[in-house]
Image: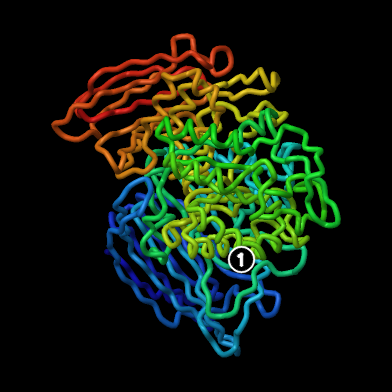
Amino acid sequence: MKIRFFLIIACFGVFSSCFIEQEMMLVSPNENIMLDFYLDKSGKPHYEVFYKNSTIIKKSSLGFDFENTNPFSDNFEVMNSSIKEFNETWQKPWGEQIDVVNHYNELIVELQEKSELKRKLNIVFKVYNDGVGFRYEFPEQKNFKEALIKEENTEFNLTEDYKTFWIPGDWDIYEHLYSTTKLSEIDALNYKVNDALAQTSIPENAVNTPVTLVGKEGIHLSFHEAALVDYSGMTLKVDPKNLSFKSNLVGSRNTTYKVKRKLPFHTPWRTIQITDNAPDLIASNLIVNLNEPNKLGDLSWFKPMKYTGVWWEMHLGKSSWDYGMEMVNGKWTDTGKAHGKHGATTENVKRFIDFSAKNNIGGVLVEGWNTGWERWIGFEDREGVFDFVTPYPDYNLNEVTAYAKEKGVEIIMHHETSAATKTYEKQQDKAYALMQKYGMHAVKSGYVGKILPKGEFHHGQNMVNQYNNAAIKAAKYQVAVNAHEPIKATGLRRTYPNIISREGLRGQEFNAWSGDGGNPPEHLSIVAFTRMLAGPVDFTPGIFNIKFNEYKKDNQVNTTLAHQLALYVVIYSPVQMAADLVEHYEANPKPLQFIKDVGVDWSETKVLNGEVGEFVTIARKERKSENWFLGSITDEKSREINIDFSFLDDNAIYEAKVYKDGKSAHWDKNPLDIEFDTFTVKKESKVKFNLAEGGGLAISLIKK
């Protein structure tokens, strides 16, 4: 570990005073990344970051604006500093791999103002081989009891006009298509927002994180945050002229400040992943490593699983979430006027249970089972609408759960809050207790709509606490949470491993009903190197009926069938949905075989190749077997890829079951053209494959 401490003394003129510039440098364990921290002559804190002797982040300042006191800007002096090296290996209870190396060098700088108040601020830097994390710590002190933060002024000043993959810094939603522009060309305020979104708020020319950048010489950067707890989510305000990002916290219409905290406290980590190739971004564990260890202990009650469910049929218009009840004397009442399209019926759910049990699928999600869907969105007063324990008349909860248990299938609960947070908070204990009674260990939560109470946004401090507290409470009932319309993933799955997955991106459903043509073929080749860096993604892959002309002739999925299969490996989640209708799977038994076989919990992950926004190939080894599974996807361009099977075990032979694009496959013209092949491979094997436009490749590697 190389850490240098400098005192630089400079004098100006014969009679002028001298100032002391204090500089500290910290390097990564492999010495490729170096961080330089210093105070300038005004006592203003700055940092710089270097990678292999090239400047990545040039002189960038750090500080805060407050509502109730003077800003933290300058006039600081270093009172103390400490350094250490840390190296451990910890294990994920579920995830992309079992063993995680957590190796970093740390610098803690203790600052104090020279002013009369002598307020204190610590800055902690951790430098890993794959990037940098730093956070602010507000220690207990006499003259500073509560911080009302108007803005956090963390700068990231860049040295070139990077190719940038971004979505706008929306305070309410992440469900936007990624734009690919130069950093200098980012214009979030003129981003075309999809009309179908329930709410959106883009107040600044800012981007959401993770935001990924690629330099001319191959440098890859991704900016994000880790351990977001009791704080506001961070967007990055763009200065196109100066090629700079600056933290821009999500606020509230109800306060003039953005974060309220009593001292002592610390902020989330600000993170910069740094590599010279795209695959290493996905392989990085920087985000989870910056979170605290598991606080829940044994999590054996949660089993990673594939699942089917009553969901996609509603997006197609085959059925509906609501039953057709009416509000009578303040209560939802069956008036005999049910419209007959309700999807969550006892009979329909049993059909999904039977299919799941037959096809090695562990769960069934049931949306629309509970009362309230008649007034769930589009109404200002949504508090009190949803009941999270009362089923509709045509859904027999006792019968369904008993039938599922008999078949060895778990029912996945659904809680759509309609963003009415007070109603959900009041019912959470009762709702989780109901799940515990029936042996349900996973819930998909939703927060569609404008947040209630009015004036709050999905990604402000109030909602960060809402999401986190819901998951922490759920753990007491042995419930794991898969959140939709969520706050961003920041690695808290390490600390609270019942936070299993989340949406937080433009998902599969946009293909069924958006008026802008759906997700383009490049979408998930960008997502793998942006959103997925934050954590598991519940994207709901596996659509076989890609054109779905029977239901919506003007919509389709913009990939090939082989691409849909590959997503089970490429886009990681410990819960993976087989999202299509039962009848579409039953009509296609050969591709269904891959979904039956593919794992969902992994002991190793290897990112074999890829370029951001173009293509990616990932291989993962299943924990419960010696089998590997491989997925590769591409954008709208066809390409030849070389698969080097050197990741396989030594002296072992595998049967490769291959699902690949047919010779005339094309995401639009012929998406269902798929070919199947079987042959043996071993560690020394190298095979070429062709990916069609918008195509993919999926391989099961079964150890013989």
Q: Between 406 and 514, which is closer to the camera in this rendering?
A: 406
Say above or below: 184 vs 548. below
Report the colour scheme. Answer: rainbow
Q: Quadrant of the rendered structure where residue 522 is?
A: top right
Q: Between 91 and 381, which is closer to the camera in this rendering?
A: 381
Does residue 209 appear left or right of residue 296 in this picture? right
Q: Between 645 and 329, which is closer to the camera in this rendering?
A: 329
In the image, farthest residue toward the right: 329
Return the x and y of residue 542 as percentages of the image width and height: 50, 29
Residue 140 shows in the view? yes
In the image, farthest residue toward the left: 651
Say above or below: 702 vs 292. above
Q: Between 499 and 515, which is closer to the camera in this rendering?
A: 499
The amino acid type, in three-letter code, at marker 1 is Glu
The quadrant in which the N terminus is found is bottom left
Return the x and y of residue 390 as percentages of the image width and height: 67, 53
Name the residue: 31% across, 56% down.
91
Residue 180 shows in the view? no
User: Which residue in the protein does label 1 denote?
Assistant: 152
Say above or below: 585 vs 89. above
The quadrant in which the C terminus is found is top left
Helix, strand, or loop for circle 1?
strand
Task: Decide: few, some or many residues near mark 1? Use Cα within 10 Å; few <14, some 14-19, many ≥20.
Answer: many
Return the x and y of residue 468 as percentages of the image width and height: 55, 62
Does residue 470 appear left or right of residue 220 in this picture? right
Name the residue: 61% across, 19% down.
547
Return the x and y of residue 448 as percentages of the image width and height: 69, 48
Give the mark count.
Answer: 1
